[in-house]
Image: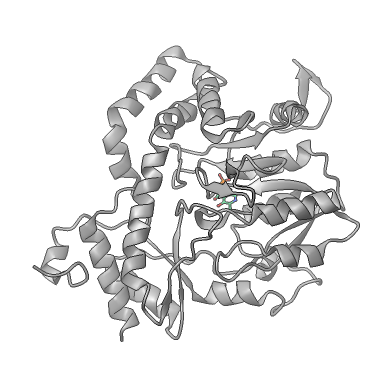
Amino acid sequence: MPSNFEVQKTEIIYMKEIRMVDLSGQYQKIKSEVDTAIQEVIESTAFINGPAVKEFQADLEKYLGVKHVIPCANGTDSLQVAMMALGLKPGDEVITTSFTFIATAEVIALLGLTPVVVDVDPDTFNIDPNAIRKAITPKTKAIVPVHLFGQSVDMDAILDIANENKLFVIEDACQAIGADYKFLDGTIKKVGAIGHVAGMSFFPSKNLGCFGDGGAIFTNDDKLAEQLRVVVNHGMTVRYYHDYVGVNSRLDSIQAAVLKVKLKYLDEYIKARQAAADYYDNAFKDHPKLKVPTRAANSTHVFHQYTLVTKDLDRDEMQKFLMANKVPAMIYYPVAMHMQKAYQDPRYKEGDFPVTEHLQKHVISLPMHTELDEEQLGYICSKVLEFANR
Ligand SMILES: Cc1ncc(COP(=O)(O)O)c(C=O)c1O
């Protein structure tokens, strides 16, 4: 028998195709439940704001331990609506990370707010609290910590900074649903239930993904929740009376019905991702050219992505080699926020954020989902090691 890392070429023929994300395998396991839930919505014709939306909302509030879940159309909207409901105004500065998906900074810019980006911690890839302190000015109004790849930002530090400077904390929890943050006093909270408000994405490939676009906003603040509900619904307080300029951002009932079923399995899905991450860690942890993801002491890691940092090897060649060997591998993210064409700003230049700039050249993410089996993991590891040992 070959060991896990020495899979023979002939075996590849029989191995399930390796995908970056395998939504089809996951669906097959819950097909009858999901199909029934979707069919119920179709037969009820309550496509918008139907019972499924309210039920999912209540289930998620319970799961997260958060007072209010306000469903919306996608994760990008969740962040935009949060900023609108907080009353942020053009010219207000919002501090966020230089290493994230574009949506985080996009909504800041769209609202005419000023995105202020800061560097990240080299181990967790999350926003560096010391860098935030240095970036605060009298115009700073909010911080957007992004729980990148599935692990919480150092929220003790973020809340301290926010309290000292009277800033809003808008968590971008889009990649980290289900992650637990442990405060210095021992209290444990789910990410998204910690700041003043949080944004969540249910994009299909997310840890809790629907069958299209979906999102939600979380808050423990009753007044803010009321305002969030107004903003997502055209700024409407009483039907056809619009006191604010709002948006149309709804989670449709079919998506909510899917999410309600999948939420029951979320902890199981997280365990499957963690098991795959353990397998990868075990294969790579002692390799001098591969740095496995650091697991922060104060957070669980729900592994939205499993991201290696490479050393002394050609990362782009490695990606090509893996792809040629039928192992999908992605670069999240190849361009730092301040280097994006659309976000060029005289305040920033190449070299300003050395950690992010190093990461963008050296990170590589491996397949990560709930359906990876040992044969696939063994094969992926063997190919990564084959390249790294060259
Ligand atoms: C960190 C982060 N923020 C925001 C978003 C935006 O979410 P959506 O694609 O649902 O608009 C995503 C998802 O892609 C994300 O990963």
Quarter of the image where one finds residue 267: top left
In the image, farthest residue toward the front: 185
Q: How many marks?
A: 0
In the image, farthest residue toward the left: 1
Q: Which quadrant does the C terminus fall into?
A: bottom left
Q: Is residue 222 above or below residue 126?
A: above
In the image, farthest residue toward the top: 44
Residue 21 can be seen, yes or no: no
Left or right of 335 in this view: 108: right
Q: Is residue 124 above or below residue 268?
A: below
Query: Which residue is more in the foreground, 43 or 292?
Result: 292
* Residue at figure coordinates x 37%, y 20% from the top left: 39
Query: Which residue is more in the foreground, 246 or 33?
Result: 33
* Residue at figure coordinates x 40%, y 82% from the top left: 288
Measured as percent of width and height from the top left, residue 304 is found at 46, 53
Left or right of 306 in this view: 111: right
* Residue at figure coordinates x 24%, y 65% from the top left: 378
Quarter of the image where one finds residue 88: top right
Left or right of 160 in this view: 99: left
Measured as percent of width and height from the top left, residue 114 is found at 81, 57
Q: Is residue 87 above or below residue 20?
A: above
Measured as percent of width and height from the top left, residue 13 is found at 14, 62
Q: Which quadrant does the N terminus fall into?
A: bottom left
Measured as percent of width and height from the top left, residue 193 is found at 62, 39
* Residue at figure coordinates x 64%, y 40% from the top left: 78
